[in-house]
Image (spheres, helix red, strand yellow):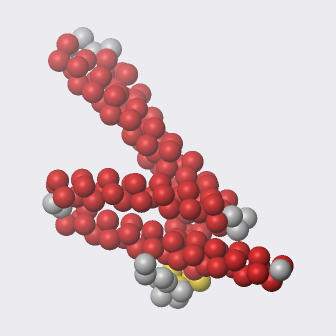
Amino acid sequence: MIQFEKCCFYIPRKTGCLIIGYLNLIGSIIGLLFSIYGIVLGDQATRSSKPKHVDVAYMIIGSAVVLALIFLLAFAFCIVLLVGINKNKPGHVKAYLKYNLIFLTIHAVLLLLSIQIDALLLLVLFIYFFLVINSYYTKMQEEKATKEIQKV
């Protein structure tokens, strides 16, 4: 797999991973807030007197709840990533990488179904982020192995 020494050509790998983690954390918080807002709007629309609006409102609520759960999961894994990087815990970073690989796969399938240029660019950016974090994880594993060898 491709290994990067720097993030964005000049930022140290660990700092780049932390930036990616914090940006993802902020994005998941914003997404969660918008999902909650969608649930509130859907709830208000259910109080509408028109039956056709009530059906749409329930669809909005259902979609917003699913999105809220996805963003909550993303938030949790961002925390796992940041703890793993800050406390030098490769297992935490690996858990985030597994979650992120599932997310990338779903994103790629949706891209193939929709064929949009902006979605393709976003997918490429997400793949780059994945590779940077994977590079840092590999470095963590190498350092751990070196420390174990030095103990012997």
Q: Quadrant of the N terminus?
A: bottom left
Looking at the picture, does residue 63 appear above or below residue 50?
A: below
Which residue is farthest right? 151
- x, y (%) of residue 19? 56, 69
Q: Is residue 4 left or right of residue 137?
A: left
Q: Nearer the viewer, residue 72 or 104?
A: 104
Image coordinates for residue 138, horizontal then vertical, percent: 57, 75
Q: Nearer the viewer, residue 78 or 136?
A: 136
13 to 29, vertically: above or below: below
Which residue shows up at 17% across the image and 53% down it?
A: 113
Is there any visible trace of residue 144 in the rendered image? Answer: yes
Give the quarter of the image for residue 148. Answer: bottom right
Quarter of image, res 144: bottom right
Q: How many marks?
A: 0
Q: In the rendered view, does 91 fall on the left or right side of 122?
A: right
Q: Position of residue 107 (x, y in %)?
A: 31, 56
Residue at the spot 39% in from the left edge and 54% down from the top edge: 103
Q: Is residue 126 left or right of residue 96?
A: left
Q: In which quadrant of the rendered image does the C terminus lie?
A: bottom right
Compared to residue 49, the image places residue 92 above or below, namely: below
Residue 20 placement (x, y as % from top left): 52, 67
Residue 86, can we see it?
no
Q: Looking at the image, which residue is at 73% across and 65% down?
A: 87
Residue 118 lies in what quarter of the image? bottom left
